[in-house]
Image: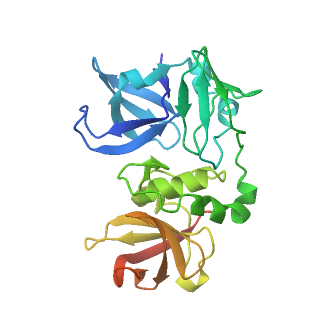
Amino acid sequence: MKNYHLCKLAIAPLRKEPSDRSEIVSQLLFGDRVEVLEKTEKWCLVKTLHDNYEGWMDYKQLQIIADVQYNDEQAYQYLTPLQLDNTLIASNGTKYYLSPGCTLPYYRDGFCFIGDEKFEVTSTPVVPNGLNFKSNVEATAKFFENTPYLWGGRTLFGIDCSGFVQTVYKLNGIVLRRDASQQAEDGVLVDFLASAQLGDLAFFDNENGKITHVGMMLSNDTIIHSAGKVRIDAIDDQGIYNAELGKYTHKLRIIKRFV
């Protein structure tokens, strides 16, 4: 029998090694499903269902679920909407404050469920629809403007470059992988910057040719990305130009279209 679990906290760190001092490589959000691959007394190595990402986390931050609950895709359609107040109220009256884009398992009639535990959902959840991508994606991305950069982050309280575009796409019904280098392997190549459209992803490399940064095109000469904070900058064939710093900060490698 496989070892299936859900994240039962608003945010839980996913670490590179089984230690509280280890680097955070990503975060789990409420309702994220994982398979436990390995377990010690405190730590477990997990693989996420939504993007096949592996990392170590504190076992106490998970709730075990049955195989049938893990695999029931219809039960995970509803997400917390694009707003600040996404409060859940547990059966004991305590509250959870969720970021936009969290999954609400088995949502119905104002409640969601993790195993046998029931949570009151105070916001109106959304079911993302990729058909409305072009009309909604700009507003989704700009909602996160000024969110601080956080390595491994996936929330309004801190987000990294690939976590930002992954979350924006998720809220618009499109699944992306976790890291910029992984995301760059997917999608359809856009040959020229002049051909770039709203929602395309631009990827940037370092001096070794490794893709280390991603942002979302707002037009063929502006980009929104997480660098220090989620910000809007100019972009040309050389890369991203930061007017505040008066210099180019990221060297353009490729542009990909996913929708």
- Hey, which residue is sitting farthest right in the picture? 109
Does 208 sit left or right of 98 as displayed?
left
- Residue 198: x percent and y percent? 63, 72
Query: 68 or 145: nearer the eye?
Result: 145
Relative vertical location of residue 160 with respect to residue 32 in this rendering, above or below:
below
Q: Residue at x 35, y 76 (%)?
A: 249
Does 3 sit left or right of 130 as displayed?
left
Q: Residue at x 48, y 20 (%)?
A: 63
- Residue 55: x percent and y percent? 35, 37
Q: Residue at x 66, y 50 (%)?
A: 173
Does 201 sit left or right of 59 as displayed?
right
Q: Quadrant of the C terminus?
A: bottom right
- Residue 180: x percent and y percent? 42, 59
Query: 219 or 195: nearer the eye?
Result: 219
Where, by quadrant of the figure, is residue 189 drawn? bottom right
Color scheme of the displayed model: rainbow
Where, by quadrant of the figure, is residue 135 drawn? bottom right
Relative vertical location of residue 111 with respect to residue 185 in this rendering, above or below:
above
Q: Residue at x 77, y 26 (%)?
A: 109
Relative vertical location of residue 14 with respect to residue 89 in this rendering, above or below:
below
